[in-house]
Image (tube, rainbow, N blue to C red):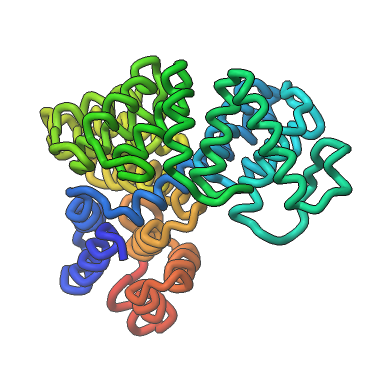
């Protein structure tokens, strides 16, 4: 259970004890901000990465609809590199057909197909590879693809060296072997390959295939980060923020979060907003916090959308605006955030800053309850009971 959700539940308990005229916004915001300090555990980092990849893929799809294929493929590739299977399948199909400005490339198609299949082992997929590969069993296609990569590595192809290292690292078409991956990455990183430098830095950070070494992790991540790789910039910020293989350093974390946020990194924008909101490594600045939450929220980041809504409810860094708060909570609700459903249901039930609407309240609370929130179910039961509703949430 998230710290934010636990805090929201505390707010709901408080709501049961206050007069009906007490503003929901103060209670909701107090609950939300109470659970936002401190570093997140590893599972939450993984979930944020998955969310960021989904946002990147959605951004790419939107750009495609707008006819901006070149930018779209940049976003979709970012999503694929972060592990989004839909983006990986899309790239496999695009390289197969040579569409959206990408060349027809059987090796690339097969590479992304395997990365997709590593996550989605079964089910249909509209991906083809080189015609000569099609009749062969999957294992034989693997062998051919790996052989072609090895040939390209022998010929001095830096990109092939990185691709082969990734296959070893992820165990796709080859057994997992981080020692071999690290050896390949060292060569590619030394030749200036940013993705290779980043992955090598992460291996040193985590001690996979190499002896854990924070200094070397920082060195290789910086090689990728200095020219502008926002993922590596975020990795460095997180290392200093959470003390991963290095001593915690709030000022360095702030510096790298700022650089990654300026490059458009969604979670970096969220982390930077939190630091401005709570004065972590920088003077408190509610307006800057709201500004960075807004930028991350516009990229579809649900936690930022919820925090921005909370700021609009309280009028922290922005003018109080119930409609804006409801808008951002609705956006977060679309991504399945149950605390957004819960707060929207409470706002409509109370009629605080927005018009009271029992139908909307019931709809949002029912969805929160469906997602497992027992407090939402209790409020929903009250709304469905005429007597309870008249006492707790009288018409306005």
Choose between 242 and 71: the one closer to the eye: 242
What residue is rendered at 64% in x and 36% in y? 61
- Picture quadrant where residue 203 is located: top left
Q: Position of residue 197 (x, y in %)?
A: 41, 26
Residue 186 against residue 308 in the figure, above or below: above
Residue 66, image x, y percentages: 68, 26
Q: Is residue 177 visible?
A: yes
Look at the picture and state if 299 lies above or below 323: above
Residue that appears at 53% across and 33% down: 78
Q: Quadrant of residue 131?
A: top right
The one of 258 and 167 positioned closer to us in this rendering = 167
**Residue 318 x/y as whole percent:** 26, 34
Vertically, is 140 above or below 63? below
- The outermost residue toward the front is 154
Measured as percent of width and height from the top left, residue 301 is found at 42, 43
The C terminus - image quarter: bottom left
Residue at 16% from the left image edge and 73% from the top image edge: 17
Identify the residue at horizontal 46%, vertical 64% (top origin).
364
């Amino acid at each position: 259970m998230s710290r934010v959700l636990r805090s929201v539940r505390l707010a709901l308990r408080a709501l049961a004890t206050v007069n009906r005229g007490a503003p929901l916004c103060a209670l909701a915001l107090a609950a939300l901000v109470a659970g936002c300090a401190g570093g997140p555990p590893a599972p939450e980092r993984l979930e944020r990465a998955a969310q960021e990849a989904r946002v990147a893929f959605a951004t790419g799809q939107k750009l495609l609809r707008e006819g901006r294929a070149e930018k779209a493929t940049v976003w979709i590739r970012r999503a694929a590199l972060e592990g989004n299977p839909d983006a990986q399948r899309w790239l496999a199909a695009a390289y197969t057909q040579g569409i959206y400005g990408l060349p027809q490339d059987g090796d690339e198609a097969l590479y992304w197909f395997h990365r997709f299949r590593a996550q989605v082992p079964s089910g249909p997929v509209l991906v083809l590879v080189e015609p000569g590969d099609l009749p062969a069993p999957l294992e034989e296609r693997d062998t051919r693809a790996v052989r072609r990569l090895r040939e390209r590595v022998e010929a001095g192809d830096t990109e092939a060296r990185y691709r082969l290292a990734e296959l070893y690292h992820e165990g796709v078409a080859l057994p997992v072997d981080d020692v071999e991956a690290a050896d390949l990455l060292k060569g590619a990183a030394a030749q200036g390959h940013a993705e290779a430098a980043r992955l090598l830095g992460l291996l040193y950070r985590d001690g996979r295939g190499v002896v854990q070494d924070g200094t070397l992790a920082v060195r290789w991540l910086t090689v990728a980060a200095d020219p502008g790789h926002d993922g590596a910039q975020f990795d460095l910020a997180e290392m200093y923020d959470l003390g991963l293989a290095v001593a915690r350093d709030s000022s360095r974390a702030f510096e790298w979060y700022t650089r990654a946020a300026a490059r458009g990194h969604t979670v970096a924008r969220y982390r930077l907003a939190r630091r401005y909101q709570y004065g972590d490594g920088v003077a408190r600045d509610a307006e800057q916090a709201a500004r960075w939450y807004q930028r991350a929220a516009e990229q579809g980041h649900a936690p930022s959308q919820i925090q921005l809504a909370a700021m609009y409810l309280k009028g922290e860094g922005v003018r109080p605006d119930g409609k804006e708060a409801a808008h951002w909570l609705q956006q977060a609700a679309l991504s399945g955030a149950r605390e957004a459903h819960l707060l929207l249901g409470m706002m409509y039930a109370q009629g605080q800053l927005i018009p009271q609407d029992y139908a909307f309240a019931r709809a949002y609370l029912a969805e929160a309850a469906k997602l497992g929130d027992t407090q939402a179910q209790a409020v929903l039961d009250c709304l469905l009971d005429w007597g309870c509703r008249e006492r707790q949430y009288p018409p306005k």
